[in-house]
Image (spheres, rainbow, N blue to C red):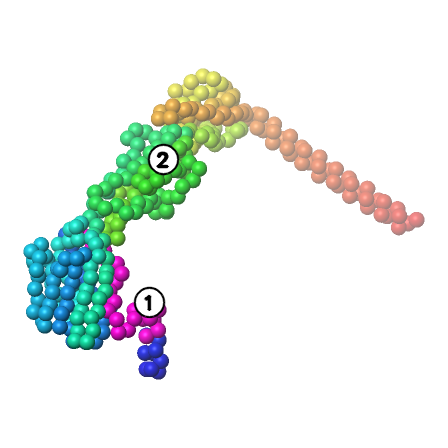
């Protein structure tokens, strides 16, 4: 089992590009300005090294000869250190100028080994800010959002209500993804927009909440269409609108003075029969929409007469049914005696 496990481990190392008995460094590393980075070999031959040298380009950064470490260039004094056991180099207080290729050379008694790695230094992303519409956004108009920050920006991603924002017929991104243009905005475009700017070592984000004003649409009146005299009636008006609309009621074309979403008439009389109209008004969109509702008020005598007619109809229906049953019985008896 142990031999099999060793074989699997060796296979994985070779598959990953790590050749046993060779000096291998990570192909690429990232760092942040002002931060630190360690260049540590993935593997290196088990040998005794007399000379260990780290170079940046052609410049020697740090060197060890038989365990004695020296830093020949003053710009690296206090910034670099070498672990002669692991051959790892630590570079501190990174600057953008540290971006480039680093070479490790390890000289043993019978062989010399060398490997390269690349460092990319980024400025941390900070101060992300979304700039959006400063005025009121009305359905049917357009809206633009832009995102910016300081630092090295590699990627820009947009989210809406915690879902990835993707291009569509009315959503267009700039080539660098830094801005979003929404043409003919709809009520569905209301929500929280998040922009995240990032690079391999840092990220920052900002949030912008956009409210799309619309309506009023789908104005409706709910309430009875027929009531009895002396009773009371309440009609309620509703509409789809942002912001919430104001209301006005008219009765047979005459202003009632009611400006709430409900209209109540106590102790209705015949004179309250007619058409009630509710008008919803949105002071942001400047739009208004109306709906009408017909109400019939019946007197008590009318109500009693209606009940009597219903009872008479019911009695006639019952009488007709009995007559039909009686005739059917007569026919059955007649047929049996023949």
Q: Is residue 283 above or below residue 150?
A: above
Could you tell whether 14 is left or right of 314 in the image? Answer: left
Residue highlighted by disc 2:
181
Quarter occupied by the N terminus: bottom left
Q: Secondary structure at mark 2?
A: strand
Magenta residues?
10-33
**Residue 242, position as x, y percentages in the image:** 37, 32
Residue highlighted by disc 1:
16
Nearer the camera: disc 1 or disc 2 = 1
Q: Who's the residue at 43% across and 40% down the image? A: 168
Q: Is residue 228 above or below residue 253?
A: below
Direction top: furthest residue: 254
Q: Quadrant of residue 127?
A: top left
Q: CA distance from mark 1 to mark 2?
A: 44 Å
Q: Is residue 111 above or below residue 287?
A: below
Total marks drawn? 2
Q: Earlier in the sequence, mark 1 or mark 2?
A: 1
> 158 or 104: nearer the eye?
104
Residue 144 in view (yes/no): yes
Residue 135 on the magenta segment: no
Could you tell whether 157 is left or right of 249 in the image? Answer: left
Q: Quadrant of residue 279?
A: top left
Q: Secondary structure at mark 1?
A: loop
Q: Who's the residue at 46% across and 24% down the image? A: 290
**Residue 319, position as x, y percentages in the image:** 73, 37
């Amino acid at each position: 089992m142990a031999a099999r496990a060793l074989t699997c481990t060796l296979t994985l190392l070779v598959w990953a590009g790590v050749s046993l008995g060779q000096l291998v460094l990570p192909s690429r590393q990232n760092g942040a300005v002002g931060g630190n980075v360690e260049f540590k070999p993935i593997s290196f031959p088990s040998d005794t090294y007399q000379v260990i040298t780290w170079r940046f380009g052609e410049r020697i950064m740090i060197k060890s000869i038989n365990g004695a470490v020296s830093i020949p260039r003053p710009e690296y004094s206090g910034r670099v250190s070498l672990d002669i056991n692991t051959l790892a180099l630590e570079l501190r207080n990174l600057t953008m100028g540290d971006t480039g290729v680093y070479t490790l050379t390890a000289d043993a008694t019978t062989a010399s080994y060398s490997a390269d790695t690349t460092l990319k230094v980024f400025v941390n992303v900070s101060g992300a800010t979304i700039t959006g519409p400063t005025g009121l956004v009305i359905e049917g108009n357009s809206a633009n959002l832009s995102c910016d920050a300081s630092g090295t920006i590699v990627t820009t991603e947009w989210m809406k209500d915690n879902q990835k924002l993707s291009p569509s017929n009315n959503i267009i991104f700039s080539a660098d993804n830094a801005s979003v243009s929404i043409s003919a905005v709809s009520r569905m475009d209301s929500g929280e927009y998040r922009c995240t700017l990032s690079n391999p070592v840092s990220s920052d984000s900002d949030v912008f909440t956009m409210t799309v004003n619309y309506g009023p649409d789908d104005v409706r009146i709910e309430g009875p269409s027929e009531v009895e005299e002396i009773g009371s009636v309440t009609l309620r008006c509703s509409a789809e609108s942002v912001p919430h609309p104001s209301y006005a009621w008219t009765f047979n074309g005459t202003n009632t003075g009611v400006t709430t979403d409900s209209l109540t008439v106590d102790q209705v009389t015949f004179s309250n029969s007619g058409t009630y109209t509710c008008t919803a008004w949105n002071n942001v969109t400047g739009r208004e929409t109306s709906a009408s509702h017909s109400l019939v008020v019946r007197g008590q005598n009318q109500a009693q007469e209606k009940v009597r007619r219903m009872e008479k109809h019911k009695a006639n229906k019952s009488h007709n049914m009995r007559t039909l049953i009686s005739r059917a019985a007569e026919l059955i008896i007649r047929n049996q005696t023949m």
